[in-house]
Image (cartoon, coloured by chain):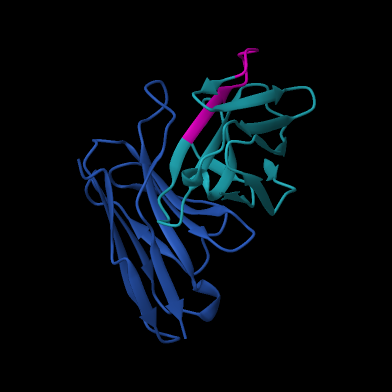
Amino acid sequence: NAGVTQTPKFRVLKTGQSMTLLCAQDMNHEYMYWYRQDPGMGLRLIHYSVGEGTTAKGEVPDGYNVSRLKKQNFLLGLESAAPSQTSVYFCASSYSWGLSTEAFFGQGTRLTVV
Amino acid sequence: AQTVTQSQPEMSVQEAETVTLSCTYDTSENNYYLFWYKQPPSRQMILVIRQEAYKQQNATENRFSVNFQKAAKSFSLKISDSQLGDTAMYFCAFMKSRAAGNKLTFGGGTRVLVKP
């Protein structure tokens, strides 16, 4: 079982460059999320989606955009990367309310912006 | 907005001993879920245990158990008979009940080192 798959796993960007992180899940989950993890701050929610074609802002959305054109995919975009976006990014997915509250996480993407 | 605080940045424990990680949270909600996640060096986030706020009984999963004190807004994790494989970062997390999106709010984490 693949679960939640993130690509790429590592990336180095120059300031001002753009990139897209891809998240794919094969569990038919309605909800998907992007978090960033920084030392001492745990994981913070960037954006999330409660269904295909819908997205919403989380706690730290500035500098990021997302799209969910297909139920199984959730893309995170950085239009103009900044050193402050150096972080580890996690995608997660879960069922909607009433079925299960457990979130399943991908293995993370380590992004360095120089 | 909810906040989750883990006051112990690092803890070490001898193999086979017991360690307790603390977590406090701030919320005005009455119904919610609390979680402990484990992140080993592989970076994978693994759910260890969950607690529903409406349940008075503390959750237990094998060697992992929680002490949930709703009035004190405290949710500690006890790891019994510690094993080398328990070495990891541990995150406490909060989720509002019946809120759109099942969004998690995480604490800053506690690094646990199990020594042989």
Toward which corner of the image does residue A65 lie, by quadrant? bottom left
Q: Which residues are magenta?
A: B48-58
Query: Does residue B49 show up magenta in the picture?
Result: yes
Residue in the picture at 19% in, 40% down: A1
How many callouts does the rendering have? Answer: 0
Q: Residue at x 44, y 29 (%)?
A: A101
Residue found at the far front of this picture: B116
Q: Is residue B25 above or below residue A98?
A: below
Q: In the current view of this chain or complex, which residue is farthest to the right?
A: B72
The picture places residue B13, in percent across and down from the top left corner, at 65, 45
Of the pair B111 and A7, the residue shown nearer to us: B111
In the rendered view, does A74 fall on the left or right side of B20? left
Q: Is residue B71 magenta?
A: no
Residue B66 x/y as whole percent: 63, 26
Quadrant in the rendering for residue A79? bottom left
Q: Residue at x 37, y 22 (%)?
A: A99
Residue B50 picture location, percent across and down? 53, 27
Residue drawn where x is 43% and y is 85% of the image: A16
Q: Taking the image as drawn, is residue B101 in sight?
A: no
Chain A colour is blue
Res. B96 image quadrant: top right
- Say which colour chain B has: cyan
Q: Look at the image and tell me whether residue B105 can be seen.
A: yes
* Foreground pick, B2 / A39: A39
B35 sits left or right of A72 in the view: right
